[in-house]
Every structure is written in structure tokens, then in C-alpha cells.
Amino acid sequence: MNVLEHIKAHRLVAISRQVYGEDLLKAVEQVLEGGIAILEITFDQADPANLTLTPDSIRAVKARFGERICVGAGTVMTVAQAEAAKAAGADFALAPNTDVEVIRRMKELGLVAVPGAFTPSEIAAAYAAGADIVKIFPASSLGTAYLDAIRGPINHIPLMAVGGVTPENVRSFFEHGCMSAGIGSAIISKKKAAQGDFKSMGEAAAAFVSALNNL
């Protein structure tokens, strides 16, 4: 799998936070049925077991679904987390911030690197450090007017919108310069997983896919 081309082609990333084990596998099955073929499994920085939970989840999803889905690690904020993600078989790694040391280690490991940035300086610094895509986070706080402003001088850097992306606004992020978008609890929800409501996750995924029809 060419990971970067897969992200460009499939565009939407379902983000899973604090959903593990069989619940995660059930959620992923529904997300795939809804039409999303990219998954981010985040590291929970507040959980001392994060270096075990997230890599184990990546392995489980890769074992169950194989080439049906591209799997990345999210909230990768340390070199150790990048290394654990790679060892588990992650295809890419995302972060909420721009940390040059972590970005460079992601690239050394052969991971597609998607660090987060908020300002033009951070976007440029992340890309200069080796980022393949820069995650604009939180995207909804900045809005499409901000994207229009920065795309003038920074039109060569691939951008992913994350944070507050909804079925109602997802299309606008693409129309204003983003090449991908990440969606969290609006698709994979810890609360819904606890209730055994996996079907609605698939329906939510389908709603995002439908919003991008003919784009």
C-alpha cells in the first residue's frame, strides 16, 4: 500500500480515542461499511498504559482487516510513541503539535508524518522538518477564511483538517484547500461503543462520505 496515495484517494480519516479491544474492531467494521478506509488510533497521553494500549489496538486492527484499511497512530507526541507505533505496524503517524524531533523520527522510521500546526510558521516548520501532510488543528476554530488566507503563500503544503469537522462543513474544507480531513467522536464514539451502538458509527461514516460526493 502506498500510504500517502491512499490518504489522497480516500480523504477521510476516522479517529478512535479510548476505544479498545473488541469494541474497536466492531467500530472499524462499521466504519468500513460506511465507506471510510483510513483509521487513526490515538495515544491517550493521560493513560500510563498508552504505550501498550495503542500499539496493541493497531496490531489487532491490522490483523483483522489487513489491506482493507490504512491504520495510523494519533497524538504521537514522543519519539517513544512513534517507535511503538511503527513496531505495531502503523502506516502513518499524526500529532496535534509541531515537534521537529518527533517528525524527523517518524520519517526515519518510514512513517507518513502528519504533525499538527496552527500558524503559518508552524505549518512551514513542520513541512521543513519532513512532514508529508500538515494537520490544521483545530480546524473549525480557524475556519475556511483562514485557509484562504494561508493558501496564497503556502499553497504547496498538503493540509488535513482536524477538529470540529462535521458532515455539514467537511466539504468546505476541501473546497478551500485541504486534501484530507480527520473526524473524531462524530464517527467513533467511546460513549456509543459503551452502549453497544456500532451501527450509528457506520451511518455517521456514510454521512461524511456522502457529503463529499462529486467533489
Image (cartoon, grey):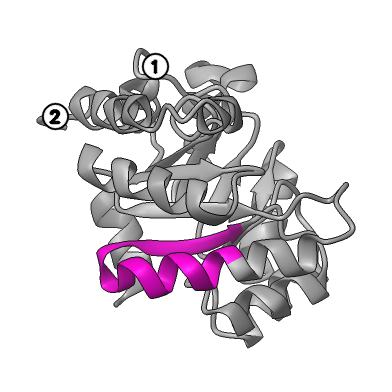
Q: In this view of the protein, which residue sits in the foreground, 200 or 125? A: 200
* Lower position in the chain sequence, tag 1 or tag 2: 1
Measuring from the top left, give residue 32's x and y in whole percent. 27, 48
Left or right of 161? Residue 203 is: left
The three-letter amino acid code for the residue at tag 2 is: Asn
> Would you place residue 98 above or below residue 175 in this image?
below
Asked which quadrant contains residue 85, the reply is bottom right
Measuring from the top left, give residue 52's x and y in whole percent. 74, 69
Which residue is depicted at the point 39% across and 36% down? 177
Residue designated by label 1: 169
Left or right of 158? Residue 175 is: left
**Quadrant location of the C terminus in the rendered image:** top left
Estimate how packed mark 2 is, as few (under 14), some (14 to 19) or many (20 or more) residues with alpha carbons within 10 Å. Answer: few
Q: In this view of the protein, which residue sits in the foreground, 215 or 200? A: 200
What secondary structure is the stretch in magenta mostly built from?
helix
- Whole-angstrom CA distance, mark 1 to mark 2, is 13 Å
Q: Please state the extent of the stretch shown in magenta in the rendering.
A: 57-73
Q: Is residue 65 magenta?
A: yes
Q: Is residue 85 magenta?
A: no
**Quadrant location of the N terminus in the rendered image:** bottom left
Q: Provide the secondary structure element on which disc 2 rests.
A: loop
The three-letter amino acid code for the residue at tag 1 is: Asn
Residue designated by label 2: 213
Left or right of 100? Residue 41 is: left
